[in-house]
Every structure is written in structure tokens, then in C-alpha cells.
Image (cartoon, rainbow, N blue to C red):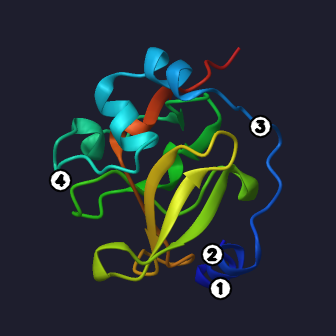
Amino acid sequence: MNWKNVLDYARKGNPTPDRRVVKTDAEWRAQLTPEQYRITRQKGTEMRNSSDMCSLFEPGQYTCACCGTPMFDSGEKYDSQSGWPSFTQPIQENAIAYIEDNSFGMRRIETVCNTCDAHLGHVFPDGPAPSGLRYCINAVALEKQPAAKAK
């Protein structure tokens, strides 16, 4: 993925997800903590530097806190100094959907889970090479899964 791909998806349509998860508002409220609900279902943002997830770099994957879809691999995580967990690539191209976001007088690209539409955060074109992408993600929108043990 690169910035052109992100913009193309946001403007022309997102890739088809592997599956869809659809629940009622009541079902989401029952499943999620109040903070997870506020961020993932109401497009909120957690406080900068409010999670220790920014400084965790153990092997594993990060999944959507709402539906369990794999979002990011720890190998793509880096310390952006932004105050939110940051990644350079999603785990697969169709894991994330992209939406133009012009709220608060800013022009940004919102990232949502392509499986359940959970708000994750935003993606910016100021990340490290080779992708140049910085997926700036709310920690409560993710769940860290440990690396699979080798047999």
C-alpha cells in the first residue's frame, strides 16, 4: 500500500472484505466497553499517550477489538512519537476501508475495519519508507494477539 492506493480507495471504493460482521447498536453496546464503543462506533479518539500500546513491540498481530479481524502485524509497528500506536501497512489490503474525512476543518483519511465498520483512526502520508504511510490507530480499537508458538 502507498498513499496513491489509499486515496484511490477513499475516492473510488474500497476492496471487498473477506467477510462482514453486522450487529445492532444494542449488540455493540453489550459487547464493548464504554470507551471502545465511543471510539469504534461513534468515531471518537482516545487521549494522546493514554495507552502503553505505543511502546509495546512484541511479536504478534493486532486485531479489531469489535470483530477480531486481523488488522496489523507487529513487524509493521513503529514509534511515530504521535502518542498513538502507528503502523506502516495493514496485514492485508482488504482489512481496512478508507473514508475521506473533512471534520474539524482538516482533510484526512479515516481508517475503519472493512469487516465491521469500526472506526480505527486515520492514515497519513508521513510514515517511514518504503510505504511512506503512518496508520495512526486508537489503541482501544485493537486487541494484541500473541505470536503463534513455533512447533
Q: CA distance from mark 2 to mark 1?
A: 5 Å
Label 4 sits on what residue type? Arg
Q: Nearer the viewer, residue 89 or 142?
A: 142
Q: Nearer the viewer, residue 65 or 133?
A: 65
Q: Is residue 70 above or below residue 10?
A: above
Q: Could you tell me which secondary element the residue under label 2 belongs to? A: helix
Which residue is the site of mark 2?
6
Query: In percent of the image, x 79 and y 61: which residue is there?
Result: 15
Instruction: Judge depth for marks 1 and 3 and give the one in front.
Output: 3
Q: Quadrant of residue 141?
A: top left
Q: CA distance from mark 1 to mark 3?
A: 26 Å
User: Do we see residue 62 in this rendering?
Assistant: no
Which residue is the site of mark 3?
20
The C terminus: image quadrant: top right
Q: CA distance from mark 3 to mark 4?
A: 30 Å
C-beta proximity under 8 Å, tags 1 and 4: no
Q: Could you tell me which secondary element the residue under label 1 belongs to? A: helix
Asked if residue 48 lies left or right of residue 135, the reply is left
Q: Is residue 6 above or below residue 114?
A: below
Residue neighbourhood size for the residue with mark 4, other residues' Cα within 10 Å, grouped as few (<14), some (14–19), many (≥20)? few
Q: Nearer the viewer, residue 43 or 112?
A: 43
**Which of the two discs, 3 and 4, labels the residue nearer the N terminus?**
3
Label 3 sits on what residue type? Arg
Q: Position of residue 47 (x, y in %)?
A: 17, 48
Q: CA distance from mark 2 to mark 3?
A: 21 Å
Query: In percent of the image, x 29 and y 51: which residue is there?
Result: 45
Query: In percent of the image, x 70 and y 32: which residue is there?
Result: 22
